Amino acid sequence: MFLDFIFKKKENNLGLDIGNHLIKFVIADSKWTDNDRVLSSAKVNFVGNIRIDNLDDPNVIQETIIKFLDENKIDRALTKTIACISGPNVIVRTIEETQRSKKDLEKDKEEIVSKYIPYGIDKAKYDLIVLNQSLPYDQSKMELLLISLLLEEVVIVEDIIKNSNLQKVAVEFDLLGAWRLLEGINYKGNFNSTVNMLIDFGAVSTKISVFQEGKMKLLRNLKIGADDLIKRMVEVLAVSKEELLNSFEELSIDDAKYQNIFIKHFESIIKEIKRTISTYKSRYSVDFNEIYIIGGVSKIKNLDNYLKREIEFNVEKINYEYLKNVIKVEKKYENEFKENIAIYVNALGLALGHGQQRKT
């Protein structure tokens, strides 16, 4: 028995973010306190990514994941997995409902959800999270957060995990990872006491989410992403897609060659950001503290400064400097993690979920 304990292999806690161009892997151990709402410490043991160009074929995704993990000598049978797929179909919104008991909420869940999701109830996987018992401006109502994912996408991810001989813990939506991270460490010391916006610039969509005192309030999912930008650049500049993907982080928004393309691409996104800021100010008398950006497109040089000028608001990239006091990284992976934190935020948050068992 004692020898079995000594030689027992350690399990891996994997956060697996299946993106439209990159699959991101983060393995981390974490400790949570205060009813599992505060991240007290974490250690990133592995971080990496691999290119994928075809999310239409689950077999290709599965083969890519297996090959990557095996090449990095990660024992799949001992790897517990929380995963997400960065599709454009996730819908997150805040709902105000007449107060009901938790028992009634569970009983009436389908009725509530059916009012808000744009596809049939049988095609959606959904969850209700009670954020507040009542709203400050109307004590007769309570606030719920609805997260809905296409069931088809959830099943695909579950099958990929199972067929890759990984242990499934959960399938989540991508920004739940970022939310868990930023709330858990109280990012910059004020995330849980102020109103902030997080923008995830993905390949097929741009997600604009609002957090009030650490709690997600809504997510606007714009079907505008890096793919649209790359397609336009290929057409206008007569360069190959492969060439652009390989040099994407070298692009600068201030480069005259790209400037008009960038301006056109970000125009509607900026409009939506401004509309969200204006709505919160006029309807709820709420002022935003910061706008944070993540995702592959956020790595474009000076994008934060460009958005700051256009929105007339402080815009920052998520910075490793604000994580390092709580989250340590294995020396071998430290440079990769620090340089590419923008693309690993969601995968990191998923990995941290293994150590966090929320009480209900």
Image (tube, rainbow, N blue to C red):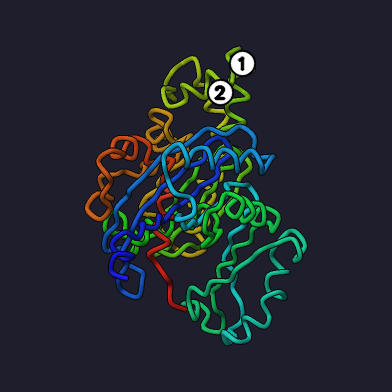
Q: Earlier in the sequence, mark 2 or mark 1?
A: 1
The Cα atoms of the two marked residues, 2 and 1, are separated by: 8 Å
Residue displayed at 28% across by 69% down: 2
Quick check: 163 above or below 64?
A: below
Q: Quadrant of residue 116?
A: bottom right
Q: Position of residue 77 (x, y in %)?
A: 49, 54
Q: Position of residue 6 (x, y in %)?
A: 28, 62
Q: Position of residue 218 (x, y in %)?
A: 54, 59
Q: Which residue is mark 2?
A: 261
Residue displayed at 63% across by 66% down: 126
Residue displayed at 29% across by 57% down: 42
Label 2 close to label 1 by CB (< 8 Å): yes
Residue displayed at 46% across by 16% down: 256
Residue type marked 2:
Ile
Give the number of the disc on residue 236.
1
Q: Is residue 27 visible?
A: yes
